[in-house]
Amino acid sequence: MAVSMAEMILLGLLADWIFRKLRFPGLIGMLLLGVVSGPFVLNWLAPDFLRISDDLRMMALIVILLRAGFELSREALSRVGLQTLLLSCIPGILEGAAIAMLGPRFLPLTHLESAMLGFILAAVSPAVVVPLMIRFIEEHRGAKKGIPTMILGAASLDDVFAITFFSIFLGIYRGEGMHPARALIGIPISILLAIGTGLLLGWLLYHLFDRFNPRATKRTLIVVGVSIMLVRIQQSLDGIVPFAALLAVMALGFIILEKHEHMAHELSAKLGKVWIFASILLFTLVGAQVNIPVAREAGLAGLGLICCGLAARSLGVLLCLLRSPLNRRERLFTMISYWPKATVQAAIGAVPLATMTQMGRDTAPGSMILAVAVLSILFTAPLGAWLISWLGPKLLTDDGPAEHAALDALIESEGDTPHP
């Protein structure tokens, strides 16, 4: 396992460097490296390494979502509050509904099976979107209108809605009698409980750090450890109380930023260094989940259905931004930022197939759902990442004042220096 991890680190750094030289996002190179190295192509990765891939990917996601929380200023969120709320649900619901209606025309699926597929695909990937938005925040692009902040917040909430609707249709398929109204009520409960828990823990950590003044490295380890425990709490509450742990992780970072901006930026800088390692694990292991033979089963029909879903999602984004102050170029950027799929599709794409196997039903629809989910990663993750990286500097204005650069330099120079 250690050898596989070492190989992924070295090859991941090389792939990142090569793709950056080619003016592509480095994460595309790491995704493709994972696909080639995974069990469905060259099978280079040790089985023990793959067995813990879920935990490693979750830890990497926690790192980047913590950084997102440390960049979510209240001022920026207040400017885009309504748009963030609308973008978190309307585009995903339209995408899922479009695939549910059109699925039987493209693939041998019923409307119910297409609905399960639709809300698997409706989740935007924080693994792809969040790092790119943080980069734009650091470059102060679109800062005046809070565009990267808006996308960060909405993309995180988007997954809550998508997974909830998927659970509803999966429950109907299983015949469990899950009442849709009860499941829908769980969405605001999940969001509010997660935000409240994250804010409380962030407030407690801030006072802990302020009183005992540990070094920045120790503060970072404590924050990461608490965030991992939030995921454990979500697993413990599964089926009892809905709880969106990753949203709580972002809220934790948000309150520390509100209480002590210098501390938050210092922690974000530390996590930025950890992210170099975590990103390699995240993107290569997501790529390793991609089953090329299965994706081939979906073919052009599956690709056509994915494109229809993206068209419905894009329409939803534009509808959400009708009364916003964003111009056409900024709306185009926001629309494209909602295309990438990866993390959720890799995590739950095989759930319908497993359910059909357990129930003794025909597994062909489950295999097709998995194939389209895999194809959506192959198609949208590299394309979306490249378009966001390429178009971002062209479509977003540079709004950064000089003092931000001075603050970044100060944080970088202080390193482990305890905060005053």
Image (cartoon, rainbow, N blue to C red):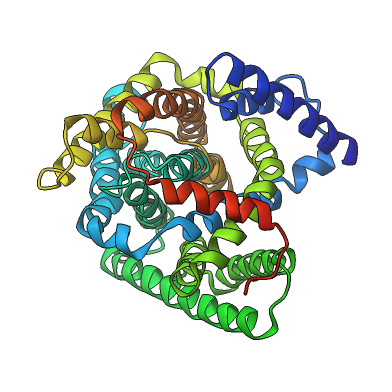
When the figure is inspected, residue 257 is found, relative to residue 303, above or below; the finding is: below
Location of residue 297 in the rendering, given as x and y in whole percent from the top left corner: 50, 19
Residue at position x 57%, y 13% from top? 22
Q: Quadrant of the C terminus?
A: bottom right
Residue 38 visible here: no
Residue 416 image-quadrant placement: bottom right
Q: Is residue 373 left or right of residue 218?
A: left
Location of residue 123 in the rendering, given as x and y in whole percent from the top left corner: 40, 44
Residue at position x 29%, y 63% from top? 180
Residue 289 visible here: yes
Residue extending farthest right: 3
Residue at position x 40%, y 69% from top? 190
Location of residue 417 in the rendering, given as x and y in whole percent from the top left corner: 71, 65
Residue extending farthest left: 323
**Which sits in the foreground, 408 or 187?**
408
**Which sits in the foreground, 79 or 370?**
79
Location of residue 4 in the rendering, given as x and y in whole percent from the top left corner: 84, 34
Q: Is residue 160 left or right of residue 360?
A: left
- The count of marks equals 0
Q: Quadrant of the N terminus?
A: top right
Residue 346 image-quadrant placement: top right
Q: Is residue 321 left or right of residue 149?
A: left
Residue at position x 62%, y 23% from top? 29
**Which sits in the foreground, 360 or 161?**
161
